[in-house]
Image: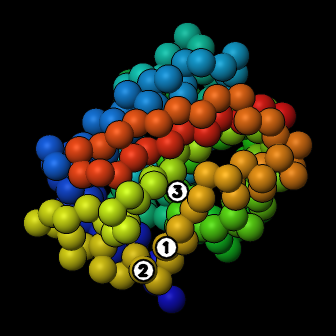
Amino acid sequence: MVNPWEEISLSDYENHMKLSSVMQLQSLNQMMKQQFNTYPVTSVMILGIAGGNGLEHIDKNKFQKVYGIDINREYLTTVKERYSDISSILECIQLNLIQDADKLPTAELLVADLLVEYIGYECFQEIIEQVQPKYVSCIIQINVDGSWVSNSPYIHIFDNLDKVHHQIEEDSLIQVLRGMGYKLITQTENLLPNGKKLIQLDFKH
């Protein structure tokens, strides 16, 4: 089965995410600035990097290696074009995380923003075991109104995502990581215009 994320155009996805009624691209960008700059690490892996939103916050004086992981090859091509200024430390890897988590390299910081929803808890555990990060920073979406996709002119590009979407609960995610020896160190919320909210959970091993 082709993963639906391989068939969604990046421009449609980003145009949906940055609508004033959605504001996820902008909110994630600011949250990622904090994710990248809070912890004493020199390597970071970003799962589901899409078009590279947030990469402008990467400090080349701090990071020696940045891994961008995505299932969509065209997304990764765009990332390399957009962020050629960090090409010396940026490595983009096309990977189906559900099938090939064992091919991931290691990194000190693992960033998973709106990603666990598409792979589930068990696969995320496998990824963490493989990457062996000291810090894990996740952002999940909580759907106050019951619908997990915000209404917009681009809503139909997400029609097939029901096949791979898992509703992730913060308490369950915390328990999963606790069972792997990761302690929750920060938890923050970011309210969105459409009644949804982004919750950031940061863990340390």
Q: Where is residue 163 in the image (x, y as percent from the top left)?
A: 47, 83
Amino acid type at circle 1 is His
Which label's residue is closer to the chain start, 1 or 3?
Answer: 3
Q: What element carries label 2?
A: helix
Residue visible at 70% across and 16% down in the picture: 40
Under mark 3, the amino acid is: Leu
Rendering quarter of residue 27: top left
The tag on residue 162 is 2
Q: Can residue 35 be seen in this view?
A: yes
**In the image, 168: left or right of 72?**
right
Q: Name the image quarter holding residue 101.
A: bottom right
Q: Residue at x 35, y 40 (%)?
A: 191
User: How far is disc 1 from disc 3 in space, using C-alphas?
Assistant: 10 Å
Which residue lies under the disc numbered 3?
A: 115
Q: State the residue at coordinates (60%, 67%).
A: 119
- Tell me the residue that label 1 is attached to: 165
